[in-house]
Amino acid sequence: MARLRIGLIGWGTVGSALGRLVAAGPLPLELACLAVRDPAATRSSPLPDGVAVVTPEDVARAGLDAVVELAGGTEEPLGWARTALDAGTPYVTANKALLATHGEELSALARQRGAALLASASVGGGVPMLETVHHLAATGAIGRLRGVLNATTTYMLSAMGEGMTYGDALREAQTAGYAEADASLDVDGRDAAQKLAILASEAWGQWRSESQVERHGIRGLEVTEGQVIRLVAEATEQTLAVAPKEVERGSALGATSGIDNLLEIEVRAGGIFRIGGPGAGGRVTAGAVYADLARLVSGERPILFGGNA
Ligand SMILES: NC(=O)c1ccc[n+]([C@@H]2O[C@H](COP(=O)([O-])OP(=O)(O)OC[C@H]3O[C@@H](n4cnc5c(N)ncnc54)[C@H](OP(=O)(O)O)[C@@H]3O)[C@@H](O)[C@H]2O)c1
């Protein structure tokens, strides 16, 4: 098996966890260079010894076997992805915001240049949701996607169903490390909308942007004690929506808790397939990135949103 030389942009929660996986093996991977925003910052996971620390632009144009972007944001990563893909370098990312905004352009560029574009970790954390949707789309027409894709709101809505106020649930989610200090991406439903747009793009072979998702978040929502509400993301070929909905306590969606994500994929003439598990966290998310790299090592060149043709 050929050894893959990779360049990594980002050494945060996911990037440093990926660094540990790469160092531990078993895949034949070499971390050739690394970029962060502030190389001099004090960090809980120190930058690895013996790896060149360069700029993200240098990583993108280094002519490596793959660029792995685990930084986040949209406009700067767009530039890095364009540079790498244009040079025929495979691009692997966990960046849902980038793909739900610029996925159409990047997928087209990847196809033009024959470069792989992979993003398992962008949806469902460690859960192979995109792979499953791709697989099922190849074997039968998908009728509908329905899921709980955001852990912060699941945590908050569970607590609110037990009598907690919105404000207290948000503070508790932040203390528990679920929600960011700025939780707007979660509570306004944007994180779930980006993930839904990516899943729908893969399901129906036509790219959808986050802006096409009809979106209602949970900001200020009042929940009666005993009610089971989840932020439900739902798509058909024509419609995309994210909204808080009451679900049956014993249903698969109603049983989600903690950081678990769940996706139901309804295949016309095939029934409903369910996939779920930990949807966030450094180790599990890095695991999905590592699985993407395993596909490159084995010679596959998958292109996200490329359809099944
Ligand atoms: N955390 C999760 O559970 C999770 C789950 C699924 C997907 N994701 C996605 O994975 C990506 C990374 O998330 P994370 O939680 O690991 O983020 P994070 O902990 O904030 O780490 C981000 C890393 O990227 C670097 N960075 C940010 N902007 C940069 C820039 N302009 N130039 C160079 N380096 C830059 C930062 O550098 P410094 O260290 O110098 O600040 C940091 O090392 C995001 O797209 C996120 O949506 C995360």
Image (cartoon, rainbow, N blue to C red):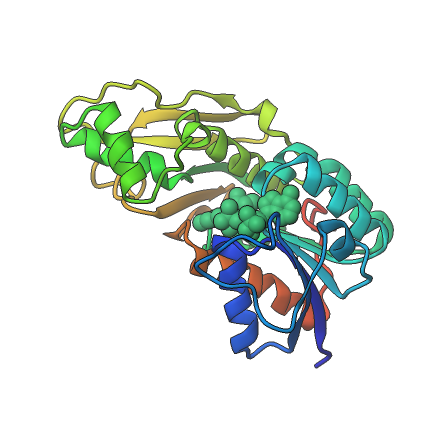
What residue is drawn where x is 76% and y is 53%? 60
* Residue 74 screen position, x and y as percent: 65, 36
What residue is drawn where x is 76% and y is 50%? 57
Between 102 and 274, the one lying in front of the other is 102
What residue is drawn where x is 60% and y is 23%? 211
* Residue 244 screen position, x and y as percent: 35, 25
Between 77 and 146, the one lying in front of the other is 77
* Residue 224 screen position, x and y as percent: 16, 22
Residue 193 can be seen, yes or no: yes
Residue 124 can be seen, yes or no: no
* Residue 51 screen position, x and y as percent: 66, 69
Between 63 and 162, the one lying in front of the other is 63
Question: Is 157 situated left or right of 130 in this image?
Answer: left
What residue is drawn where x is 66% and y is 73%? 30
Question: Is 259 situated left or right of 45 in this image?
Answer: left
Quadrant the N terminus occupies: bottom right
State how many labels appear.
0
Question: Is 162 situated left or right of 201 in this image?
Answer: left
